[in-house]
């Protein structure tokens, strides 16, 4: 099998991640609930995971990292903690439904900008917050959030960053946003069911409690306190998964995010150069910066071939070549409306540190075969 669906989840994980999960399954009790060895082992592992994530982005206090089950849960919790019904919010057309749907559910007034220039120009219209996906999971295009955050800070606007596609595979730092929501199972090479929230300016930003229950402390209080990290962490944490996440984050940190990104973009470069001139192949996104080897983007390439449906292309790739890609809308409806692909979606190729050049070339040859077949079928 050739696995090119890493933007959905990284299938191939470092051995250290697998071992960490196995070790946790054998040793961990409930973290933070007692003083016996299994409970303390789990508690120490959870704190070590906070430290790894904080270290990765340069966040001073590990206790400003809360853990959740996913970036989706993180964005729901942050939306409820920060916003009120009817608030005016800016987002981007490239944003994922994990950004959009919590805003719609909250009955916010939402404007989605189609470019960063448009987004920055709209800051003067008085939004309470900007909530965006850092990188598009459809095109791989990135916003320059350093510029955006500076503009937000100057106007007192909260910036929430969905870093599901970037943390671990592209430089993400604590000075890029007020809140960073992330997942563990993509570029951090962690297990599914792990994710979190980093509050970079806590306690400057007031937050409301919207997840409540047992925290292992202050049990006689009727209402849960609003301190990090327990603010978002009622219930038993997934210490097994978080031990694996810590190992994945450590793997990323030791290799270096820049090293990982450079390799993944080198693979992307090979793929783009191989398919961009094939008949009938359409590539979506900004790939004009060839001289920079696509330095400021993600290792994601969405394509279509002639009039093939993206689902048909993905199914054929799997059946004919055992190549795994993701077809469809990718839970990002607004960007597909912008691209004009809402009726058939796109077939998304997304690459990882563990992919090889030979796999990329095999993918190119498969696309070449379909492109030539479609050209012949249409009398070309």
Image: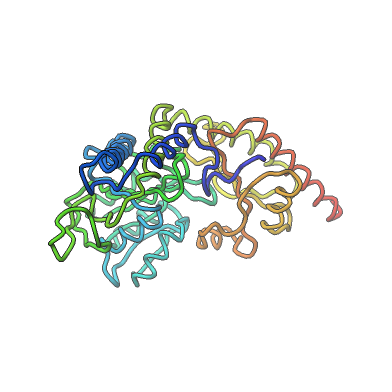
Residue 31: x percent and y percent?
Answer: 27, 46
From the viewer's perspective, tell me whether residue 8 is left or right of residue 119: right
Q: Quadrant of the N terminus?
A: top right
Could you tell me which residue is drawn at 74 percent across and 51 percent down?
316
Instruction: Please state which of residues 278 and 270 is positioned toward the viewer in this rendering.
Output: 270
Instruction: Please state which of residues 15 and 174 is positioned toward the viewer in this rendering.
Output: 15
In the image, is residue 100 above or below residue 115?
below
Q: Residue furthest front?
A: 36
Residue 53: x percent and y percent?
Answer: 33, 39
The mark tally for this picture is 0
From the viewer's perspective, tell me whether residue 201 is left or right of residue 299: left
In the image, is residue 299 above or below residue 259?
below
Residue 379: x percent and y percent?
Answer: 86, 54
Taking the image as drawn, is residue 176 in sight? yes
Taking the image as drawn, is residue 126 in sight? no
From the viewer's perspective, tell me whether residue 266 is left or right of residue 219: right
Residue 102: x percent and y percent?
Answer: 38, 65
In which quarter of the view is residue 111 placed?
A: bottom left
Could you tell me which residue is drawn at 56 percent across and 60 percent down?
336
Instruction: Please state which of residues 32 and 182 is positioned toward the viewer in this rendering.
Output: 32
Could you tell me which residue is drawn at 42 percent across and 47 percent down?
143
> How is this picture coloured?
rainbow
In the image, is residue 311 above or below residue 177?
below
From the viewer's perspective, tell me whether residue 162 is left or right of residue 354: left
Instruction: Please state which of residues 243 and 146 is positioned toward the viewer in this rendering.
Output: 243
């Amino acid at each position: 099998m050739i696995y090119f669906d890493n933007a959905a989840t990284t299938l191939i994980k470092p051995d250290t991640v697998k071992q960490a999960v196995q070790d946790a399954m054998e040793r961990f009790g409930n973290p933070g609930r007692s003083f016996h060895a299994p409970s303390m082992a789990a508690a120490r592992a959870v704190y070590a995971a906070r430290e790894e994530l904080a270290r990765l982005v340069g966040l001073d206090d590990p206790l400003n990292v809360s853990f959740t089950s996913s970036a989706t849960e993180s964005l729901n919790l942050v939306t409820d903690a920060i916003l009120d019904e009817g608030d005016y919010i800016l987002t981007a057309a490239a944003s994922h439904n994990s950004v959009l749907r919590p805003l719609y559910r909250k009955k916010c007034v939402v404007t989605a900008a189609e470019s960063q220039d448009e987004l920055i120009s709209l800051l003067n219209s008085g939004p309470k917050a900007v909530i965006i996906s850092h990188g598009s999971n459809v095109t791989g295009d990135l916003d320059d959030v350093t510029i955006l955050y500076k503009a937000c800070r100057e106007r007192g606007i909260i910036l929430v960053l969905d870093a599901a596609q970037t943390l671990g595979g592209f430089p993400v730092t604590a000075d890029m946003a007020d809140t960073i929501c992330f997942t563990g199972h993509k570029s951090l090479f962690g297990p599914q069911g792990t994710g979190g929230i980093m509050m970079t300016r806590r306690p400057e930003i007031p937050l409301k409690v919207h997840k409540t229950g047992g925290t292992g402390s202050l049990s006689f209080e009727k209402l849960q306190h609003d301190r990090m990290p327990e603010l978002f962490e009622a219930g038993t944490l997934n210490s097994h998964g978080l031990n694996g996440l810590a190992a994945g984050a450590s793997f990323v940190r030791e290799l270096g995010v820049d090293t990982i990104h450079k390799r993944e973009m080198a693979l992307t470069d090979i793929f783009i150069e191989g398919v961009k001139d094939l008949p009938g192949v359409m590539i979506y996104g900004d790939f004009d910066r060839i001289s920079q080897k696509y330095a400021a983007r993600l290792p994601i390439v969405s394509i279509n071939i002639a009039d093939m449906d993206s689902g048909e292309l993905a199914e054929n790739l799997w059946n004919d070549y055992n190549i795994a890609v993701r077809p469809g809308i990718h839970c990002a409806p607004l960007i597909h409306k912008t691209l004009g692909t809402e009726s058939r979606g796109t077939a998304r190729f997304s690459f990882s540190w563990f992919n090889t050049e030979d796999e990329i070339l095999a993918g190119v040859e498969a696309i070449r075969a379909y492109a030539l077949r479609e050209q012949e079928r249409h009398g070309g």
